[in-house]
Image: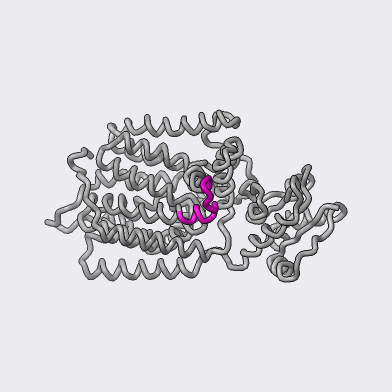
Amino acid sequence: MSTSACEPAKAPRAVLLVAAVLAGFVATLGVSTPVPSEDGVSYLSMAAAFAAGRWHEGFGAVFPPGFPLLLAPFVAVGAPPWGAAITGGAVCLGLTLLPLWRLAEHHHAGAGWPAVVLFATAPLLPRVAAEVYSEPPFLLLMAFGTWWGCRGSWWRCGAAAGAAFWIRPEGLLLALAFVLVDRRAVRALLPAGLGVAALALSRGLAGHGFDALPMLTFHEQRDDLAGRGDVLRNLLAVPAAWFEAFGGLGAVVWLALRSAPRGERGGVGAVARAPLWWQIGLQVAVVCTFVVRRRFLLSCAVPVAALAGRGLATLPRRARTVLVATIAATGLAFTLRSGIDADRRVERELGQYLGSQLAPGERIASDLPRVVWFAGQPPPPPRHFAADRLLAFARAPGVRCVVLSTGSRRDSAREAAAALAAECEPFVLPPPLADACAARGIRVLWRR
C-alpha cells in the first residue's frame, strides 16, 4: 500500500453535484421531521452548553463531544441548534461522497459511481442525518481516513481516527484495520492515541476525570437493554439489522469477493482491499459486544459502499446499471416512507408550552428527553428508567412538573405516576395539546 501505488484520482464535478443534491435532500428531510431523535436532543443540549462556554456541562454528558463541538461555533453566533445540526449533518453526508469516490476508484476503475449512488440512496443514512445523529461527521472522517490509509499516509489516517473517536469511539478501529494488514500502519496509532488522550485531558480539565469514554461506564450500569453483551445472540441478529441499515447495498457488497474478469485493468488486489473488510468485521464485532441496532452498523458504511462499488464494477454494464437503479430506487422509497412519526410533534409542543409555564429555577422531570429539551432544560440520560429512578427524578429539589409516557409498553412510567398521585395533581393543558397528549399516552403532573 505505498503512496505511489495509490495516486489520488480526481473526483469529477458531477460528484460535487450529487453531493449537493444529497445535502439538499437531507436538509429537506430534516425540515419535515417533526422532532429530533432522542439522542439528537442530547447533542443539541451539549452544543448549546459549549456555545455558552459551559464546558463542565458540555463535557459532562455521556455522549462523545465531537459533533456538539462542531455545531457550537454556529450556535454561538446565533444559529438555532436544531437548524445548525440538520445543516451540519446534511453537509457532512454530502461531502463524504468525495473521498468515497476516490476510495472506490482506487480499488477498481469504474467503482466510484456505483459506490456514490448507493451510499447516497442507502435507506437509513439520509434519515440519521435529518434526525440529528452523529453519523454524518463520523463517516466523513472515516472516509478521508480510509482514503489516506490506502495511500499510505499513516499520520493523516491516524489523525482522522483520533478525530473520529471524539464523535464515536469506533473511530479507533480505522487505524487498527490498517495495522492488521500493514505493519507500517503502526505509525497511525500515535496520532490516533493522541486524539484519545486529548479527549481524556479535556474531560479532566472540565472536572469529570480523565476518562475518554464515559459511555462505556454508563452502558455497563444499564439494565434496560435485553441482550446486552450476549455476543452469540447479537451475532444472529446481525443479518436482519444489516439489511435494514443498508438494504440492497448491504447485499451487493459481497460481490467484491468476485474476481475481476480476466484481462480487465484498473483494480488492486485482495490484499489492498483487506483493510476495508477488516473495518467491517471490527465494527460488527464491537456492535455484537453491546446490542445490535441497525443504526450502529452504519459505522462501517464507507467500506461497505466502496466494496459494493468495486463488486458492481466487475459486472457487465447492463447488469450493473439495472442493479444500481433498482437498489437506489428501493432505498429512496424506504427513506421517504420511514422516519419519526408525525404525532411525535406533541413532544415539542408540550415542551415549549411547559417551558413557558415554569417559573425561573423550576425544573421538569420526564422520561421523554425531547419534552425536557424543548422546555429549555438539559435532557435526561439516554436510557429507559425503572420506576424508582423516575420517582427519584420527580422528587428532586426544584422539580415542579413531571411528564411521563404512560402509554408506552413499559410499566415503569405508570408505576411512577401512581406513586406520585398523593404528591401531584394532573396539569390542565389547552384542549388541542391535551388531546394530542392523551392520544400519545403522555401524562403531565404538577407538584402540589
The residue located at (45%, 52%) in the rendering is: 88
200 relative to 124, above or below: above
Q: Residue furthest left?
A: 263
Where's residue 203, x and y in %?
55, 32
In-image side of 148 versus 405 (left or right): left
Which stretch is magenta? 75-87
Tell me if I can see residue 288 in this picture: no
Front residue of this view, candidates 156 and 331: 156
User: What colour scheme governs how the chains and residues are painted in the rendered image of this protein?
Assistant: one colour
Residue 328, located in which quarter of the rendered image? bottom left
Q: Report if residue 86 lies within the magenta region.
A: yes
In-image side of 287 versus 46 (left or right): left
Front residue of this view, candidates 330 and 16: 16
Front residue of this view, candidates 385 and 160: 160
Where's residue 335, x and y in %?
45, 66
Where's residue 177, x and y in %?
35, 40
352 relative to 216, above or below: below
Q: Report if residue 132 lies within the magenta region.
A: no
Q: How many marks?
A: 0
The residue located at (48%, 51%) in the rendering is: 296
432 relative to 76, above or below: below
Q: Residue furthest right?
A: 422
Where's residue 366, x and y in %?
71, 52
Residue 206, located in which quarter of the rendered image? top right
The residue located at (77%, 44%) in the rendering is: 398
Task: Give the quarter of the figure containing the N terminus.
Answer: top left
Tell me if I can see residue 22 in this picture: yes
Front residue of this view, candidates 427 and 244: 427
Please identify the dominant SS of the magenta region. Answer: helix
Q: Residue furthest front?
A: 77
